Amino acid sequence: MTAVHTGLQDSETARPTAPVETTCGPVRGLRSNGVTRFRGIPYGEDTGRHRFKPPRPPQPWADVRDCFALGPKAPQGVITISGVMGKVSPDARALQVLMAVQRATDSQLSESENCLVLNVITPDASPGGKRPVMVWLHGGGFAMGSGMDAMTDGSALARCGDVVVVSLNHRLNALGYLYLGALHDDFADSGNCGQLDIVLALEWVRDNIAAFGGDPGNVTVFGESGGGAKVGTLLGMTPARGLFRRAIEQSGPAVRLVTRDDAAAIAERTLAALGVAKTDVHQLQALDYKAVISAASQVRLPSGGAGITERGLAPVVDGRSIPAHPFDRVATDLSRDIPLMIGTCKDEATLFMAGDPELGNMSQEEARQRFEAVLGANAQGAFDAYRDAGAGSDPSYWVTSLMTDRMFRADSIIAAERKSDQGAAPVFMYRVDYEPRVVDRLLRSPHGTDVPLMFGTLVPPEFIGTGPDVDALSQRMMGAWINFARTGNPSQTGLDWARYDRRERQTMIFDVPCRLLADPDPIARNPVVQGKT
């Protein structure tokens, strides 16, 4: 298998396919470059007609529907990451990387509440293929993003791995996660509408994917950043049980979600900002959605929080679709038989400090001050530990290592530990250490490094680099993801991958070359770093 560079543009003329029957009506796709793509298939009704309520299947159609173009993305929100990332004097070298990533991930799609669409990429759109199915959940926290772009085009995975790749759009930010259930029973499920959209899409996969050459009994859900957290949330969702067989959480652990009390407080503050009385909560269904998103996005989680759930517009432990936190204090029993692959990139937080002029050029005193801003009275011991672990590195990387661990790595380890403790399905841990050969490796191995490697798109080159090393690593990572989806074990020829447990803590390091290491991140298990003191 070789890594294939591909984007949304076809290099050969695309040909319409014969119709494929679905439960809602016949659809046609386009065939080119060894795969068939169906884009913008509706799996749910226009959510603007029932805002803050669970999704409904679409109205069926009789005529053949041409699914040649991506559908609209969900109305977009904002992501704010606080902590040490507060300076905004962009380094020109890092800025060009961020702009390239934005161009690759922003598909320029229109926004609409009528956004419940999915995309299918298959080697052969005909029944009987029984291929593994990989359902991609996009990043962007729970606030923004869309299911498919140049970086996350699944064509190379489908072509090289003989798998069917599905991606989808679903409700985000306030429209997907503003919990109004404490104000009126009509909105009891509103805090998890975005997740219930994903469940509806998985039900569509169960009922239809065989016609596209996929095996509905062998479905893997995978996602990065907010998409990884959506995967982790699905592991603890009652209505998702039985809809997928394996799971991959990439840089988005979901140990704890938003509590019902916090979610209710966010809703009350949102109504106050909009000038809507609590007794008139139904008015939110008629307001301009942009005003609702804006108001809710300004409200912080009352009890604090970290990473992607900091602002609280995230899945809610509502006692209905989500009965408990997925990995707190133990791993959810709902998915004890689901194998899990989980991991992060080594230097996630550098992406969020890319506009900081002191990245790569920070004094020890400034680093110490940033540790104190995050950890307060507990800062000194952690500062010493990261300084010793990063000896020889610029002090700014001690700071980014702390933030990487607090935002991503520590909770990934906690989830892996608790999954392993169940003694049921295996868990496999990884870390991407590869440093793209761009901007003098200023960003090291930033958030998102895994995505173009694992998809085999290798775009944008300004972010991921080019050359034999990146090609070889992409080949290895694609192989691991495909093998896990096919068998539940990511091992491949020349690269055995042992399951993770507390005793050995075997972790696959994706680099050139790849290697298995025991316990490469002991500092991330420090209670101070994990926020337990």
Image: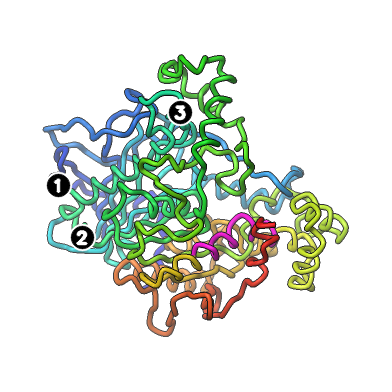
Instruction: Note whether residue 2 is visible.
Output: no
Q: Is residue 196 found left or right of 93 in the rendered image?
A: left
- The 10 Å Cα crowd at callout 2, few under 14, some 14 to 19, many 20 or more, is many
Tell me the kind of residue under disc 3.
Ala
Three-letter amino acid code at the position of disc 2: Asp
Residue 215 tag number: 2
- Of labels 1 and 3, the one closer to you: 3
The quadrant of the picture occupied by the C terminus is bottom right
Which residue is disc 1 drawn over?
A: 20
User: Can you give x and y, in whole percent of width and height, for residue 21 in the image?
Assistant: 13, 45
Q: Which circle, 2 or 3, is nearer the viewer?
A: 3
Identify residue for label 3.
182
Foreground residue among 164 and 415: 415
- Magenta-span inclusion, residue 402: yes
Position above or below: 501 against 326: below
Residue type, numbered disc 1: Val
Image quadrant holding the N terminus, namely bottom left
Whole-number angstrom distance, CA of label 2 to CA of label 1: 16 Å
State the extent of the magenta-drawn residues as a range. Answer: 401-415
**C-alpha distance separating marks 1 and 3:** 43 Å
